[in-house]
Image (spheres, rainbow, N blue to C red):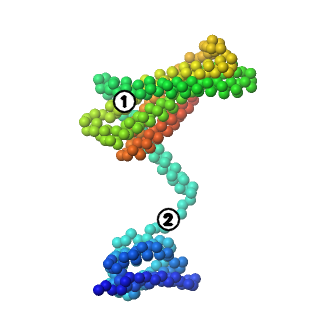
Amino acid sequence: MGGPSPSFLLTPGDRPHAEARLVLAGDWTVARLGALERELAALAAPSAEQVVFDLTGVSRLDSAGAWLAVRLRDEWMSRGKDVRMLTASPEHDLVLARVAHASPGPPPAPTPRLYILEMLDRSGRELTAGVRHTLRQVGFFGLLLKTLGRTLARPARLRLTSAVHHMETTGINAVPIVALLSFLIGTVMVFVGAQQLERFGAQVFAVNLLEIAVFREMGVLLTAIIVAGRSGSAFTAQIGSMKVNQEVDAMRAMGLDPMEMLVLPRCLALLVTLPLLTFLADMMGIVGGGLMCWLYLDISPAEFLERFRALTWPWHFWVGLIKAPFYALVIAVIGCFEGFEVSGSSASVGERTTQSVVESIFWIIVFNAFFASFFSMVGV
């Protein structure tokens, strides 16, 4: 027959420096504990700083009962209580000692930290991770150059069909959106610029503003951002999906180089299509601006073209076009790199696709600022 059922009674100290006492009684064994574990877990710690676990009334104690007592003791000690155990049996002392030795003990109290230190620590970790990420991208670009050199040495290795396919998807299929947005940007620039120049009676100089802004900056910048959001994200999603489905591993197992099969054709395609799209964006921006000059400034198309030819400096056009291959490399390299960084789930594909677009636009703007400073210093 079993012994008395296990029970406990908490007596809180009713005086300022009195001890609280938790009295345990009965058989604290695995067969008798039952719902007692949940009741102990819900037991609130007393307000007194000194607590005594009185086990003198415990008739039988095994490792399960000892573990409940030790766990509760450790929990209260982690809250700043001074807990000691009182037993009437050396055997119980031995069981408690062995269980306490095997338990992890009370968790350390959290060390208070200043918010500024936490912010600096987090910023440092993010900066370090960003530098490492950028260095991996530079290494990926070096691997691309190595693959390009190997392909130039043996042109038959070039996946021409794949490159032409990506030229279609990144170039021809992007013509409508690039043309429409560039046309609208041209109209907006003339409209806003003419409103400001009207204060000085110089609305006619909106043609100068249009030519410089579209050719040097807005044409190539707008095109690069559109391509980054459209094609760069597609590169990441395509390669990332192949990574999740283990198709990239299958390529390597068959002796095929993913850089040669997946990355190089996409990079070559963008190197061809982005300058062409930039040229299209320049022309559509000028057409949109010319239309707005006709409707808003009463400058006829013939007068607009005559003034445009008289003002146009060829370098403005070439300054914008020179940037296009660099932006193409940025978009293609980052898009493909982030695709290879996908790790095992569809959620990772979405995260890397978003990161690809953000990084591409960031570096496009950084390179744009660099080119603006460089051409300004050389007087172009």
Amino acid carrying mark 2 in the image: Pro
Instruction: Tell me: 133 left or right of 245.
Output: right
- Residue at 48%, 37% (x, y): give it: 357
Disc ID at residue 119: none
* Distance in Å between CA atoms under marks 2 and 1: 52 Å
Residue kind at label 1, given as amino acid type = Leu
Looking at the rendered image, the quarter that the N terminus falls into is: bottom left
* Secondary-structure class at tag 2: loop
Q: Give left or right: position of 14 versus 142.
A: right
Residue 15 location, quadrant:
bottom right
On the image, numbered disc 1 is attached to which residue?
A: 264
Q: Is residue 162 visible?
A: yes
Identify the residue at horizontal 40%, vertical 29% (top origin): 267
Residue 51 placed where, x, y %?
Answer: 48, 80
Q: Residue furthest left?
A: 254
Marked residue nearer the N-terminal end (2 or 1): 2
Quarter the C terminus occupies = top right
Q: Position of residue 379 (x, y in %)?
A: 59, 23
Residue 136 percent location from the top left of the image: 41, 40
State the SS at label 1.
helix
Task: Looking at the picture, tell me which residue is in the foreground, 366 or 258.
Answer: 258
Decide: few, some or many residues near mark 2? Use Cα within 10 Å; few <14, some 14-19, many ≥20: few
Is residue 212 visible in the rendered image? The answer is: no
User: Considering only vertical position in the picture, is 326 above or below 103?
Assistant: above
Q: Residues within 10 Å of mark 1 (few under 14, many from 20)?
A: many
Total numbered badges shown on the rendered structure:
2
Q: Which residue is mark 2?
A: 110
User: Which residue is at the front of the view, 18 or 61?
Assistant: 61
